[in-house]
Image: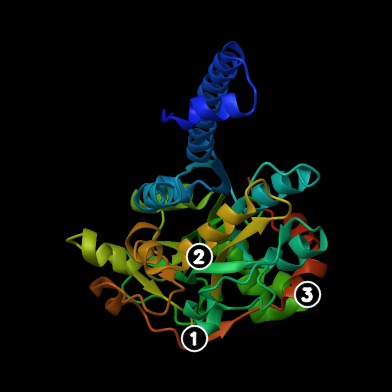
């Protein structure tokens, strides 16, 4: 705004300015002000547009999108942080880590989401991800907080179990040893540990129980129990629902899903007396990512109740936030009395070798 007053006329006269010079300066000042306001307005508009179109890029497993968790959680984050979230899906953690490693010198992603805990040492050693201790990390249940360096940050977990059709099986085997008595031949589908996250966890479950020297011996006897090794858990699950086999490997709370969604409620879960294996899914921030501050906000959001409350009935996973009250169907699942595990250092040093030996000796694979 330009305010005219007597000062505009008196001051030039006092300084000896000619009236024409004054008019010239006055016009130039007006042009300068107009240009200033134009560029200032343009700068604000550009800044707002730039803020609105900044992207948080997430590499994740397809389950994040397929089962509805992303549609329930991402819009709120976008709204609160004035950004867009781009989700790129992969088959499993291996593929996510492989892609992030390829881009290590010039990262495209901000967040890796759904990473299995067995990759902790690898992502640290290869400097794929950075350490970040969330401000709200105390919300995480201590039993799943396996990385105090916060390179991998747990957001959900689950326990492996055998899922069976109670219309086809009245009394499931109580131990792993009972599987080998000849009564359960060709009764089970498992997903391939080379291509499936659940398959990999089941493989590590057997290593945890029979150690790195005895697991192959167990598998050679267990092989007769398996009807088929499928490329994915989804494939096993579909064949199971079709009644092709009475049992599959799955998560213990699949029983909770059917108690809520299936009137016949014939699908049950059981855990052998030797114990179960806990699969923990994690998120992490890519090292030298394009939007580090936005990525940190996303980590905080994932641990919050606004995000965690959707996990039990979309992903059918246990939330890590200890304040979340599990829905009613979860009260009917088998109790977890014993959990077995393999040290992460041993996994990092031996996993590829163990799997190569498995691939070499298990002939049922297709």
Comparing labels 1 and 2, the label whose residue is closer to the camera? 2
Q: Position of residue 334 (x, y in %)?
A: 36, 80
Question: How far apart in space, not on screen, are marks 1 and 2 (Cα)?
Answer: 37 Å
Q: Residue furthest top?
A: 20
Q: Position of residue 41 (x, y in %)?
A: 48, 30
> The residue tagged with tag 3: helix, strand or loop?
helix
Nearer to us in this view, 287 or 141: 287
> Any mark on residue 300, and which?
2
Nearer to us in this view, 349 or 289: 289
Note whether 212 is above or below 249 in the view shown.
below
Crowdedness near tag 2: few (<14), some (14–19) or many (≥20) residues, C-alpha within 10 Å: some
User: In the image, is 116 to the left or to the right of 157?
Assistant: right
Comparing labels 2 and 3, the label whose residue is closer to the camera? 2
Crowdedness near tag 1: few (<14), some (14–19) or many (≥20) residues, C-alpha within 10 Å: few
Mark closer to the chain start, 2 or 3: 2
Circles 3, 1 touching at the beta carbon (< 8 Å): no
Question: How far apart in space, not on screen, are marks 3 and 1 (Cα)?
Answer: 24 Å
Q: Position of residue 329 (x, y in %)?
A: 26, 71
Nearer to us in this view, 123 or 254: 123
> Any mark on residue 346, and which?
3
User: In the image, is 300 to the left or to the right of 195?
Assistant: left
> The residue tagged with tag 2: helix, strand or loop?
helix
Comparing labels 3 and 1, the label whose residue is closer to the camera? 3
Which residue is identified by label 1? 273
Circles 2, 3 touching at the beta carbon (< 8 Å): no
Mark closer to the chain start, 1 or 2: 1
Nearer to us in this view, 40 or 220: 40
User: In the image, is 238 to the left or to the right of 53?
Assistant: left
Note whether 297 is above or below 138 in the view shown.
above
Q: Position of residue 337 (x, y in %)?
A: 46, 88
Q: Is residue 113 visible?
A: no
> The residue tagged with tag 1: helix, strand or loop?
loop
């Amino acid at each position: 705004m330009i305010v005219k007053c007597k000062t505009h006329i008196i001051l030039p006269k006092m300084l000896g300015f000619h009236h024409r010079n004054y008019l010239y300066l006055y016009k130039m000042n007006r042009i300068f002000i107009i240009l200033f306001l134009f560029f200032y307005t343009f700068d604000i508009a550009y800044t707002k547009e730039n803020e609105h179109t900044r992207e948080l890029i997430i590499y994740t497993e397809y389950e994040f999108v397929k089962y509805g968790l992303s549609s329930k959680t991402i819009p709120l984050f976008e709204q609160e942080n004035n950004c867009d979230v781009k989700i790129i899906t992969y088959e499993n953690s291996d593929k996510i880590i492989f892609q992030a490693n390829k881009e290590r010198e010039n990262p495209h992603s901000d967040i890796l989401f759904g990473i299995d805990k067995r990759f902790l040492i690898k992502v640290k050693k290869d400097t794929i991800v950075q350490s970040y201790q969330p401000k709200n990390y105390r919300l995480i249940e201590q039993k799943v907080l396996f990385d105090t360096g916060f390179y991998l940050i747990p957001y959900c977990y689950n326990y492996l179990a055998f899922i069976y059709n109670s219309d086809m099986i009245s009394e499931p085997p109580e131990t792993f040893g009972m599987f080998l008595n000849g009564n359960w031949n060709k009764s089970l589908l498992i997903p391939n540990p080379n291509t499936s996250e659940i398959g990999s966890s089941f493989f590590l479950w057997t290593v945890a129980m029979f150690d790195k020297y005895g697991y192959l011996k167990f598998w050679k006897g267990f092989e007769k129990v398996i009807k088929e090794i499928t490329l994915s858990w989804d494939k096993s699950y579909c064949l199971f629902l079709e009644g092709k086999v009475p049992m599959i490997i799955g998560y213990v709370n699949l029983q909770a899903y059917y108690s809520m969604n299936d009137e016949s409620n014939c699908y049950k879960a059981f855990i052998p007396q030797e114990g179960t294996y806990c699969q923990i899914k994690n998120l992490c921030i890519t090292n030298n990512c394009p939007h580090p501050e936005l990525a940190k906000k996303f980590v905080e959001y994932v641990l919050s109740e606004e995000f965690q409350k959707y996990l039990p009935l979309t992903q059918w996973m246990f939330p890590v936030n200890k304040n979340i009250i599990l829905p009613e169907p979860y009260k009917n699942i088998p109790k977890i009395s014993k959990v077995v595990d393999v040290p992460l250092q041993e996994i990092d040093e031996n996993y590829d070798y163990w799997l190569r030996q498995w691939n070499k000796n298990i002939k049922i694979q297709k």
